[in-house]
Amino acid sequence: MVDPRALLANIQRRLTARTTNRWRTVMIPGVMGCSSSVVLEEAVPTHPPTPVLDPDEQQRLPAFVPKHSESLAEAYRRLDEEICALESTTPGPRLMTAEAWVELLQSAKGPAGIELEQERAVPAPLPNEVLPNGTIPNGVPGGAVKQPIPTEKDRQAESARTEMVKIILKLDIVSNEFKAAQQEEFIARLSRTAMDQEADHFREEMIVHARKRALALRTNFERLKRLYIEQDHMLTSVYNGAYGTVKEQNLDAELDAARDVRDRLGGAVEQWRIAGGLLRAAAKGLHQVVEYWELIRPSKGAEETITLALDARSTCHGALMALEAAQAALPSVEIPYITIRQQSAVRHALIYLLTDMVNPARYQHTRDVFGVFSANISKAVHWLHECYSETLKQDFDSPDQVATLLAKNLREERLRFIVNRMPNKIYVRPAIG
């Protein structure tokens, strides 16, 4: 079980002060509940068509530079528009939350689990790659999804499942209620052991997924920092450390404040995103569980029946763990429609599932338990999205719109100054390490 309070502790530990007026990584974890956000399913922001290179490519080719020559004013507009688009995704605060979430999941596994997870670490995504459908998630360039290589533990789990099928077939409980009742506690012990092993596997999967997200955000954050550095060099060559006008200075101060408000919400946005994704995964899994359970009665062979039952148990167990993780991701929010008592009833049903399926009355009871739980999880998903749409999105959109407008006004003010001072100067990108 993941301790919800540990996530906030991890985020608080990662809080850092600003190092410049634009290199923001500040997020206040207390901004939770119905006072956050952006989106649970984020749209891809529109960026200027500027290439993004990884560090190795950057040594060979000039990054962020169009093929044609451009004036200093054109280069400033291009850079500032891309910076504003990236800033709107708040990669710094989101990155802190994503990394804190990875640490929380790892801590729930213990030292042995962490070592195993590190062996299965996913390589960093290549910045120029996109998803198979041609999109870039959240405007973050990410690598193509690669299937993890099965580990020794995966093979052991598959072997254990095969042995479980053999044992149940030998006990001949699938079509014999009397034998099923006799072996009920023995089968229950086997189920508990198997579910404990499954729990480690599900945690590993969550960690792999969380690390992919953190790596993608890290790529985006590093990209934003490189853009900041380039723009700072450009402004230094024009201003020599001083503002051009009083209006520019005032706009910069107002923009800094608006960005700070937006950044304070960014980490909370990521928490809602994590919880929303896990809750949707739980709902999808439980829908499959109901389908598996419906197929058990019409199934003909004993081995087919056992396989369907094990599929139902494993899928439902994964959904339970996803639900627990979703609740831990939003420790200050009470997700409705789901109770501890109901979760305990579902877990109990999973432990005795292999013998209950033989008894018609118990089979129907388990069917009802799965059906009600699936319906409640679907309601919770709907509630989470409604809460986001009605309150959370507005909280983020307001400062984001203010920051976008102020950035545009500041950009135009600086462009006027640059054009007046250096109207024909061709931009030469500085060497950035």
Image (cartoon, rainbow, N blue to C red):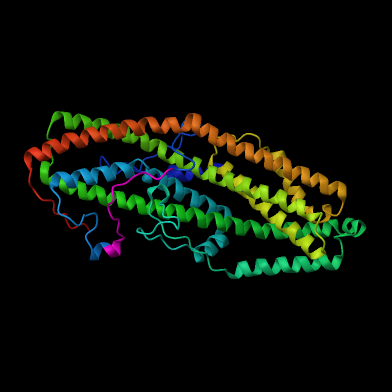
Residue 416 at x, y = what percent?
13, 36
Magenta part mainly helix, strand or loop? loop
Vertical position of residue 392 compared to residue 177: above or below: above
Q: Give the extent of the magenta segment.
A: 43-57
Query: Which residue shows up at 73% across the image and 68% down it?
Result: 162
Where residue 18 sits, quadrant-wise, is top left
Vertical position of residue 425 compared to residue 169: above or below: above
Residue 103 at x, y = what percent?
49, 52
Query: Which residue shows up at 71% across the image and 60% down it?
Result: 194
Residue 150 colored magenta?
no
Query: Which residue shows up at 20% across the image and 29% down it?
Result: 250
Residue 306 at x, y = what percent?
78, 61
Regarding residue 221, the answer to whether it shows in the image is: yes
The image quadrant where one finds the C terminus is: bottom left
Marker count (numbered): 0
| Residue closest to the eye, 20 or 224 | 224
| Residue closest to the eye, 417 or 93 | 417
Residue 204 at x, y = what percent?
56, 58
